[in-house]
Image (spheres, rainbow, N blue to C red):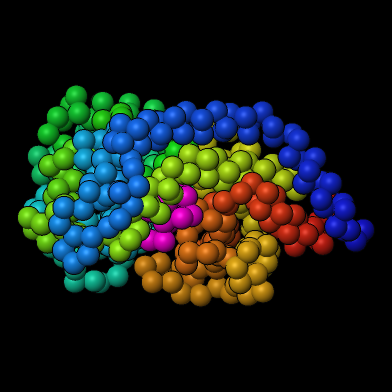
Amino acid sequence: MRALSNVDVTDFVNAMRREVQDAWERVDQIALANQRKVLKAFHTHRISEYHFASGTGYGYNDAGRDALEAVYAQVFGAEAAFVRPLLASGTHAISACLFGLLRPGDELLSITGLPYDTMQQVIGLVGDNPSSLIKWGVNYRYLPLKDGKIDVNATIGAIRPETKVVAIQRSRGYSWRPSLSVGEIGAAIRAIKRAHPQVLVFVDNCYGEFAEEMEPCTVGADLVAGSLIKNPGAGLAPAGGYIVGRSDLVELAADAAVAPAIGMRVGAMFGLTRTMLQGLFLAPHTVAQAIKGAILLAKVMEELGYEVTPAWSEPRHDIVQAVRLGSPERLVAFCQAVQSAGPVDHYVLPEPGEMPGYKDYIVMAAGTFIQGASIELSADGPLRDPYIAYVQGGLTVEHCQIAAEAVVKALTSETDLP
Ligand SMILES: *Cc1c(COP(=O)(O)O)cnc(C)c1O
C-alpha cells in the first residue's frame, strides 16, 4: 500500500471538483433566484436601520420584529410568520405547531415514515414523557414512504374524521431515504385537499429552506416550521426558530409556544433582529455553499467506493449528505476527520455518546461558532447499522473542500486512492 501524500489528496479532490462544475452551476442558479426573492421581500417591507433596534421587557410594538416576520412571511409564500430567538430549536418550533393545532381526540398522521428522532419523543412514540402529544390524548399514526415517495392513495384512504393534521418531513433527517422535492409535496397536498379539504397539512422544513426555488407554503402547506441555526439563519442567527403559514394557524402555534392570546404580540428580541435579517439575506448563498460542498463530498466518496445519498449528480431538496460507512470505526474516523478540519475545537476528538432527544448513541463532529449549528459544517451519525454519517452545512465551499481532504486522508490509509 502506497502512503498518501498531501499533494495526492489535494490533487484528487481538486480533480473531483472539476467534475462537479455543471452540478454546482445549477445550485448557483437556484441561489440567484432565491436571492432575488429575499431581496424583493426586504424592499417590499422597506427594511431600514431603525428596524435593527429592538425593545425590551414585553417587547410590545417592536417594529423590527414585525418587519422581520413580514419579510419571512413573504419569502416563504405565507400569510404570516412567527420568528423568534425564544424558539429554542427546530424541535421547539415544530412542537409548538403540533400542540397549537391538535386537541385531545384529534389525530396526527405522518405520511413520510417515522418522524425525526427528537419528534418521536414530542409525539410520545419513544420514552414515557408525561407531556407528549399522546399523553395529552392525541392519536398518532404514520405511513411509510413507498419507493421513496409519499403514498398519496394510502394517505387519502387513511384519513379519518378525527385526522386533523397530516405531517410531512421534507428532509431525510437521520434516515436513509430521499428528501422530498417541493413539487412532490405540492402534488400530495393538492390530492389530499381535493379528497379531504378540512385536513391541515404541516411541513417540517428543517434543512430544506432555499435548497429549491419554492417553499412548502407556495404549494399549499398550511403551517411550516424550521430552525434558525440551520439554513435560514445562515450561520449568523445565534439561536431561534420560525413558523410560517396561514395567519390563524401561526397564531395558534405562537400561543402554544408563549401563552394563549399573547404569542404574536410579545417577546423581546434581545438585539438580534439585525442578525436575523442579515442571516436571512445571506441564506440563499450560504445554503448554496453547503449544497456545493455536499455535492463535492458525494463525488469524492463515490469515487472511493462508498454508497451515498443523494448521488453527487442528483437534484437536491435539502442540505443533507448521507454517506454509508459500513462500520463503527469508519463512522467515527469520518466524524473525527470533519472535526479536525473545523475552525473551532479542531483538536477535540469526538467520541460516541448520549444526546438528549435521541435514542441511539450519536457521534457528532461540530467545530462550529454556534453550538449545534448544522448550517455550519457538521457530521453526525447514530451508532447503528449500517453506520451512516449525515453531513450537513458548510459556510464556505472552500472549507467543505478542505474537510473532504481530511476525510480522504482518514479513510484511504486502508483503501488507497482510486
Ligand atoms: C434538525 C431537525 C429537526 C429538529 O431540529 P433541532 O433544531 O435539532 O431541534 C426536526 N426535523 C428535521 C428534519 C431536522 O433536520
Magenta: main secondary structure equals: loop
Look at 56% across and 33% down and name the residue there: 27
Magenta residue check for 322: no
- 28 or 113, which is in the foreground? 28
Q: Is residue 132 above or below residue 17?
A: below
Which quadrant does the N terminus fall into? Answer: bottom right
Q: Is residue 54 above or below residue 154?
A: below
Q: Position of residue 195 (x, y in %)?
A: 18, 26
Q: Is residue 30 above or below residue 395?
A: above
Where are the magenta residues, as a range?
227-240
Residue 150 visible in rendering:
no
Q: Is residue 262 left or right of residue 47?
A: left
- 58 or 50, which is in the foreground? 50
Look at 73% across and 40% down and name the residue there: 17
Say which quarter of the image contains residue 180: top left
Q: Is residue 385 left or right of residue 34?
A: right
Q: Position of residue 264 (x, y in %)?
A: 16, 52
Look at 72% across and 46% down and name the residue there: 300
Look at 55% across and 73% down and name the residue there: 352
Image quadrant, ligand 1: bottom left
Q: Position of residue 244 (x, y in %)?
A: 26, 43
Q: Is residue 310 left or right of residue 91?
A: right
Q: Position of residue 233 (x, y in %)?
A: 42, 51
